Each structure stands twice: as structure tokens, then as C-alpha cells.
Image (tube, rainbow, N blue to C red):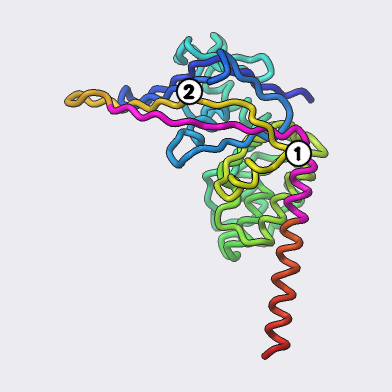
Amino acid sequence: MDSHFKITFPLIMDDEESFSIEFVSRKGDSLEFKEGIYYLCGDNGSGKTTFLNMLALIAGNIGKKATNKVSIMFNGEAYNGDNFNYLRAAEMREKSFCIFPQKAFFLPISTRDNYIILNGTEKEREQSFSSRESPDLLSGGQQQKILMDIVLDDKKPVWFLDEPLTNMDAERRHYFWITLDNACRKGLRIIFFIDHYLDRAIIKDADFQHHGTLGVTMSRYSRSKSPDMESQEIDIYRNNSPHNFFSRQALNIEHEISLKKKGQLSNGMHI
């Protein structure tokens, strides 16, 4: 399965004529995302989440309403094409994109019914969820695991991960990395990743190469004031060996858990 993004800049999104955001590649007039992990690094408020949301078709104008100053293409289909509309965007998201954490809440019904409501019916996956267990009665950690199981679908080739490790304990983080590693052996091809938890580790990791820099200009408009403009940058790093990275993260957490258990045992013996 071949999955490939190509973006021609500048990229501008308008929101109620009061806010616009422009992304400009520092390396020329186009940026391509082929297979691999793409890690977005930048200050808070630099537009990383907005950029991912536009790629994932959950923000910005599409179809004929999209600005002709930009071309975003996924597998050769342009987001601002004449035949592209919100129904086509929804179809593409359903078929090709995982967005995590998904903005969803658990209903007071079974885990299986929650899966069906969020993702529709797929018999094989549906049967893996409990028809008796209600996720809203589980602990926070157990709910995180179930949300991962529901949202992260290894049949979809592109995953958008926006700070997925927030508030996860070591066991949940380990499960997360194992899930990504397994997905890379199946249908997962491109991963977009934001997480302040990993910033320093990514920059120092020899397997990640600098892929490009986005200049970001945000403009806020008011009838009574002149435009308020702010400039930021987003650096993008690429790793084309996801399996090695994910398995290494899982091993690091296994080591972390092991040390923690030894420390607890030592403390217990001391007492």
C-alpha cells in the first residue's frame, strides 16, 4: 500500500475572517511526506496541531472553498480539487486516517457498542470488544487502553498523533509503543507525531534527520485594530525506520518498569 503526501506552499487557512495562519516551507515551494515517522517540534502555540488538523481534514477549507495558493495532495488527490468536498473528506478520513487522541467520550453502554458508534461495524474487530464491560465504569488507565484499541486501526495507513503520551503511566505508554510497532508490520505507513515528552530525545536521535522547517505566520484581524501578527517556526524530523524506533521505546519503558519494581522490592525489604 503506497501512501504519500505532497504539499505546495504557502498554505493559508481562514476562520470566520478573523484569523489566518500561513505555513511556508523554508526549503522551497514543496514538501513531501513519504513512508516514515514525521516528528513536529516547535514552541507551544506555533501551529503544530493546526498543521496536523489540516492534513487530517478536520480543519480548514477544502474543495472549491480552499485557497488556490496551496496544494495538499494525498495519494494524488488534491484537497482543493473541483470534485473534493466534505463528504469526500469524511470518506478519506474513515478509510485512511487515524487521529489520536480522538475527541470522543464513552457512553454508558458496552465497550463493543462504543466501538461501533465511533467506528461503524467491522465484524473481526467488533468481536474483540466486550459486550458486557462498560468503559465509563473503568479506571482512567483502563479507559486509555480501550481508547487506543478503538481508535488505533492498523489497517489505516496514516496516523496523526497529537501528544498521545499525555497523562499515560508507564504501562500504558508501553502498550502504546507496542501497538505502533505491531501496526508498522501491517498497514501503517506514515506517522505524524507531536509530543513535548520526546522533544530532546528526537533531536539527539541519530535515526531522525531534519526534513524541513515551516515558517508560521498567524494573523488576527479586528475591525477596530490593525492586524495582530505573530511569527513562529516548526521543525520537522523524519525517521524512515519506524519499527526500530518503536521497539526501542518499548524496551526503554520495560527497563523503567523493571527498575521501579526493584526499587519497590528493595524498599519493602528495608522496611
Which of 151 and 2 lies nearest the eye of the viewer?
2
Q: Amino acid at mark 2?
A: Phe
- Mark 1 crowd level (few <14, some 14–19, many ≥20, 10 Å Cα): many
Task: Give how far apart the Cα atoms at labels 2 and 1 are.
Answer: 26 Å
Residue 72 in magenta? no
Residue 178's place in the image compared with 206, above or below, is below
Residue at image position (72%, 66%) is: 257
Q: Residues within 10 Å of mark 2 (few under 14, many from 20)?
A: many
- Residue drawn where x is 44% and y is 22% of the image: 22
Q: Which residue is mark 1?
A: 242
> Outermost residue toward the bottom?
271
* Residue 190 locus on image (x, y percent): 70, 31
Q: Quadrant of the C terminus?
A: bottom right
Image location (x, y in percent) of residue 144: 61, 56
- Read off the residue under disc 2: 23
Residue found 73% across the figure and 28% down from its top: 35
Amino acid of disc 1: Pro
In the picture, measured across the screen, residue 119 lies left or right of residue 259, that is left
